[in-house]
Amino acid sequence: MALIHYVECNTTHASNFVVDVPAGAHWLLVITKTPALFWVHGGLKQYPAHSVVLYQPQQKVYYQACTGQFINDWIRFESSEPYITESPLPLGIPFALSDPDYCQKLLELLASEHHMGGDCKASSIDLLLRALFNKLWESYFQDNITPQYYKLLKLRTSIQTNPGEYWTVARMAGVLEISSGYLQNIYKKTFGLSCMEDVINSRIRMAKEYLIHSTESIADIAARCGYPNVEHFCRQFKQVTGYTPRNYQRQAKAGASPP
């Protein structure tokens, strides 16, 4: 289990903000939203926004603003759990965070549990911290996290959260302010499939859910999933799953396990 001493999210500091704790204290996790200077290997080094740094107890902590303002999330805590104490994450050395929005949500939930709490407060905090450290572990071992990657990730999250929207390559490229050809190239290189394949997969995944668990008509489900033309929906659904929507629905409700 873990004991949280303090946690703050999306905190804005002035341009002269400095944290200087030569002897350290408890475990400290800092996630930046703006560039910042960190004391690393005996000197100050600038790191970009969306950097994360973990300090162990009694380790020197020094970081400061280096732009007009400094914005960060941070949590100071105690824990003897091996997923923290034996973590392969570097100590006192910032690295790029692969999914800042996801981690911020986890920290917001940790803050809520810490400040409000309930009967399951301790176990909830432990589970949230485990999820957060899993994401940090993934980030540390992920290469080529660039500012462009964060934009692509936001786009992909929008696609998978709202697959029924009117998604086209041109529209997606416009969101990122790049050409359609460049978007298709970097999207597939980053995620291993094209942006439209991602749209189609997300729509079919959503359609499966409604086919099995709702009473809506095939036409209504098609429209909900971004297909104004029900014939096009049925054709694409069969291309992806091998079943027509109606047959998929029958198989699932009969207790079979279609893909």
Image: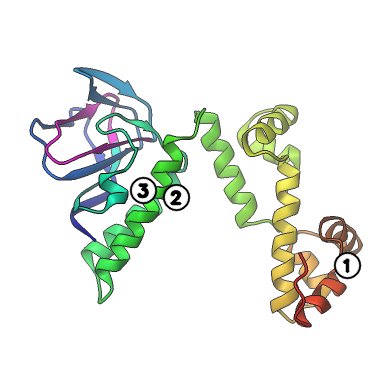
From the top left corner, tell me how far across and down residue 96 is, in percent.
41, 32
Residue that numbered label 2 is attached to: 102
Q: Mark 1 vs mark 3: which is more N-terminal? A: 3
Q: Which residue is drawn at 61% across and 45% down?
A: 156
View extreme (left): residue: 23
Residue that numbered label 3 is attached to: 133
Residue that numbered label 1 is attached to: 244
From the top left corner, tell me how far across and down residue 249 is, in percent.
80, 75
The three-letter code of the residue at mark 1 reads: Thr
Q: Can residue 154 be seen in this view?
A: yes
The three-letter code of the residue at mark 3 reads: Phe
State the separation of the CA atoms marked 2 and 1.
35 Å
Q: Mark 2 vs mark 1: which is more N-terminal? A: 2
State the separation of the CA atoms marked 3 and 2.
12 Å
Is residue 246 found inside the magenta-colored segment of the image?
no
All told, the count of numbered labels is 3
For the residue labelled by badge 1, is the local secondary structure a helix, a strand or a loop?
loop
For the residue labelled by badge 2, is the local secondary structure a helix, a strand or a loop?
helix
Q: Left or right: where does residue 143 sit relative to residue 1?
A: right
From the top left corner, tell me how far across and down residue 240 is, in percent.
82, 56
Q: Which residue is drawn at 32% across and 50% down?
A: 83
